[in-house]
Amino acid sequence: MADFNWLYLFQGIATLLASEPGITIGRLVLIALGLLFVYLGAKGTLEPLIMIPMGVGMAAVNGAVLYLSATKMGTIFIDPMVSDPAPLLDALQINFLQPIYTFTFSNGLIACLVFMGIGVITDVGFILMAPFSSMLIAICAELGTILTFPVAVWMGLTFKEAAAISVVGGADGPMVLFTSLMLAKHMFVPITIVAYLYLSLTYGGYPYLIKLFIPQKLRGIKMDLKGMPKVTPGEKIAFSLITCTILCLLFPVAAPLFMSFFLGVIIKESGIKKFVEFLEGPVLFGSTFFLGLLLGVLCEASTILNPKVLNLLILGMFALLMSGIGGIIGGYIMYFISKGKFNPVVGIAGVSCVPTTAKVAQKEVQKINKHALILPYAMGANVSGVITSAIITAIFCTILR
């Protein structure tokens, strides 16, 4: 008993002191970052649905490192690198989040579930009300995806790795998750973490981008909504069926995502209340909760401090920055086409973080003009952005797979 090391009883602290200085500092920084995410999520500065479970998971996993053997340190949350059947059975029995990760996250199922939920809360009628402006802006908002790919290759990533991180520019988390699983599974964890870290920052960063590139006078433009046509549920169902079928024919590799999204839309427009309640409640919020929690516990210091992750952080920020600028350029193109009647702030909504960027656009406009309503146009661009980002994902996966 006299030789017992009392520090060994508190293994989180013991492993912290026994780790390399870089890992120790990394763990402490990530714990602090996790606490900050929870605070900013609870305050509403960042997206609470993702950031609160992610922040708690991040703080917990970097505190809970223990000795798995005499020489090996780790956690009993998740082992994302286990794929062989025999070790996987052991991991499923030991790591309490492993079944959720293995059966829903690491195979892309969670992306499809989230997309079903997004579909059931999405109104595709906004696209049909203003199809030209919606698609034009959405295409312009893919600028970050297009520009990031050659930059990533120049920085030393392979074509597949470059494509996986480039899709962050579409600001569509499930697309990033799906693409990284298809093309760069070995970098799936850091790419997905980078994507969701930055997607939550669209709340805080894009308003400054709007103020930087769009003068106050233009931000206050009041758009005419009287001329927008009414779209019936039947027209929305027909649009969804036709679009889904065409996209599945053209890009079968991304058919699960197309089907999931448009299935949600069709269920909503068909008025099947029980399915709507199921998809927009347990499916969407359950998937989002576990997505955030799993992302948090994947943020171990040893993963985040991989030298390649720094490049991914830079590329992810560049992709979202350029997509935001591209969307604003699309807004300006519509402003000039309409001879000054179109509010260019709508452009930021082309970045398909549904419905975050549309809400950001409306909020910034109302700060200048309380009577200006741009949300229908912004939602049209937003939903079109989901479709364009899915198409680019499919193109990457088809060509590079």
Image (tube, rainbow, N blue to C red):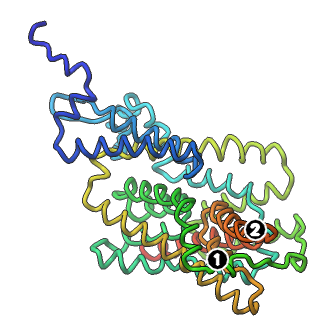
Q: Which mark is residue 142?
A: none
Q: Which residue is mark 2?
A: 375
Label 2–label 1 contact, CB within 8 A: no
| Secondary structure at numbered mark 2 | helix
State the residue at coordinates (28%, 36%): 74
Badge 1, how many Cα within 10 Å: few under 14, some, many 20+?
many
Badge 2, how many Cα within 10 Å: few under 14, some, many 20+?
many
**Residue 255 occupies which quadrant of the picture?**
bottom right
> In this orientation, does residue 110 appear?
yes
Residue 9 in picture, x, y percent from top left: 24, 18
Which of 263/62 is in front?
62
State the residue at coordinates (49%, 62%): 176
Sequence order check, earlier mark of 2 and 1: 1
Q: Which residue is mark 1?
A: 347
Q: Tell me which amino acid carries mark 1.
A: Gly
Q: CA distance from mark 2 to mark 1?
A: 11 Å
Residue 349 in picture, x, y percent from top left: 64, 70
| Secondary structure at numbered mark 1 | helix
Residue projecting furthest to the left: 3
State the residue at coordinates (35%, 32%): 76
